């Protein structure tokens, strides 16, 4: 049996130990652990990397602590618009949604688009209609609301600024765009990312999380990557695909390729954030240039890790 492994993230940013209470820290650790538990068992039982990462993302989208699905951040007009994408490294098929509202699990909609439509990406109302026609769960606005995110938005309302949810200063911080990558027992890799985007963003703004090659990429020949951070530089750097290219065309290792993109290419564009990755040999990496990144990994050779700070 070949090695199988799974890596997840719950967002990167100014995550400082001194600003987080023990209670908050354990809540985030538990959120990451729940996601790892849910999807690792699928991998253990011979399930596919695609099913494992979907399960991990759904678990975090349903958790109000993370900025994805329930608990997403607010845009300038007070709406909650979400982006998500998923990619299958075996076939290079992909699905994505951007600026969708009222979709309980945007990753499931992205998956349905990948499997049940000739398209890769749908947005807004058209995506919503597709969701209702394909049995994807929807929820009323109240479901997505969290007082904490609302307070974050209130601090920025009226300004032209937008911020990573982790960087808005408030007493009780909550963080997190979510992502997952996996390699299964059959040697197939997959990646997915889901987010509410950046607090006080212009509504209609689309971030890297829904863009194949920027926030998400998977290719069995190279690696699977999910990114988190300030979306615009990640789009301009085509960050996730760049890691794959450095491996494919330059023969770099996963770690070195991710390190170059995160600590050199992205920083030159003021791109704060990080990414998680796995390669065909089951090597993994979790690399960020911010103060912290919620992250965790588990693999068949006994690695089981959850971390937050540098
Ligand atoms: N990358 C996301 C975006 O720009 C935000 C994040 O990762 O927290 O929409």
Image: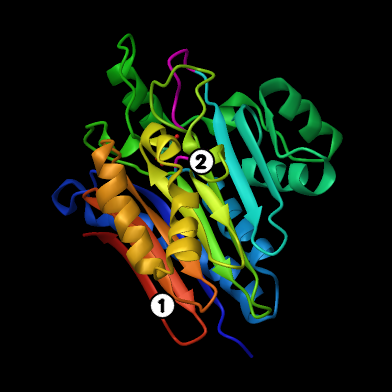
Is the C-beta of the residue carrying label 1 under 8 Å from the nearest atom of ligand 1? no
Q: Element under label 1?
A: strand
Q: Which of these two is toward me, 292 or 122?
A: 122
* Residue 51 quadrant: bottom right
> Decide: marks 2, 1 in contact (CB < 8 A)?
no
Write the residue at 67% across / 62% down. Answer: 50
* First-in-chain label (2 vs 1): 2
Q: Name the chief secondary structure element in magenta.
A: loop
> Image point 48% across, 53% down: which residue?
226
**Segment tinted magenta in the rendering:** 67-78
What's the distance in space between the residues labelled 2 and 1, CA to CA? 26 Å
Q: Is mark 2 within 8 Å of ligand 1?
A: yes
Q: Where residue 263 sits: x, y (%)?
A: 25, 52
User: Residue at point 64% right, 91% down?
Assistant: 1
- How many other residues sit within 10 Å of disc 1, few (<14), some (14-19) or many (≥20)? some
Local SS, label 2: helix
Image point (48%, 37%), residue name: 208
Q: Residue furthest left?
A: 18
Ligand 1 quarter of the rendering = top left
Q: Position of residue 237 (x, y in %)?
A: 40, 40
Q: Is residue 91 left or right of residue 40?
A: right
Q: Nearer the viewer, residue 210 or 103?
A: 210
Task: Specify whether residue 71 is painted magenta.
Answer: yes
201 or 28, nearer to the observer: 201
Is residue 166 shown left or right of residue 58?
left
Mark carried by residue 120: none
Q: Residues within 10 Å of mark 2 (few under 14, many from 20)?
A: many
Return the residue at label 1: 304
Q: Quadrant of the C terminus?
A: bottom left
Q: Which residue is mark 2?
A: 209
Is label 2 or label 1 in front?
2
In the rendered view, does 120 fall on the left or right side of 280?
right
């Amino acid at each position: 049996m070949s090695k199988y492994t799974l890596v997840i993230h719950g967002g990167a940013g100014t995550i400082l130990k001194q600003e987080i209470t023990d209670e908050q820290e354990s809540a985030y650790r538990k959120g990451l652990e729940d996601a790892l538990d849910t999807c690792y068992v699928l991998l253990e039982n011979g399930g596919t990397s695609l099913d494992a990462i979907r399960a991990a993302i759904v678990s975090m989208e349903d958790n109000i602590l993370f900025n994805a699905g329930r608990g997403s951040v607010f845009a300038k007009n007070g709406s909650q618009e979400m982006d998500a994408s998923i990619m299958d490294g075996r076939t290079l098929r992909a699905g994505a949604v951007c600026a969708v509202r009222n979709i309980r699990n945007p990753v499931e909609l992205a998956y349905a688009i990948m499997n049940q439509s000739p398209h890769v990406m749908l947005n807004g109302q058209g995506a919503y209609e597709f969701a209702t026609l394909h049995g994807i769960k929807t929820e009323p606005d109240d479901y997505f609301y969290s007082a904490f995110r609302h307070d974050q938005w209130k601090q920025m309302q009226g300004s032209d600024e937008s911020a990573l949810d982790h960087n808005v200063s408030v007493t009780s911080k909550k963080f997190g765009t979510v992502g997952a990558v996996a390699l299964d027992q059959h040697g197939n890799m997959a990646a997915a990312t889901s987010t509410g985007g950046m607090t006080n963003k212009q509504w209609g703004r689309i971030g890297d999380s829904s863009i194949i090659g920027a926030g998400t990429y998977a290719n069995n020949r190279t690696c699977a990557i999910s990114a988190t951070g300030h979306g615009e530089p990640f789009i301009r750097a085509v960050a996730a695909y760049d890691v794959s290219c450095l491996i494919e065309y330059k023969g770099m290792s996963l770690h070195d390729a991710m390190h170059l993109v995160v600590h050199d290419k992205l920083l030159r564009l003021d791109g704060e954030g990080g990414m998680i990755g796995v390669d065909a040999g089951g090597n993994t990496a979790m690399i960020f240039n911010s103060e912290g990144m919620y992250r965790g990994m588990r693999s068949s050779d006994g690695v089981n890790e959850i971390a937050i700070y540098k």
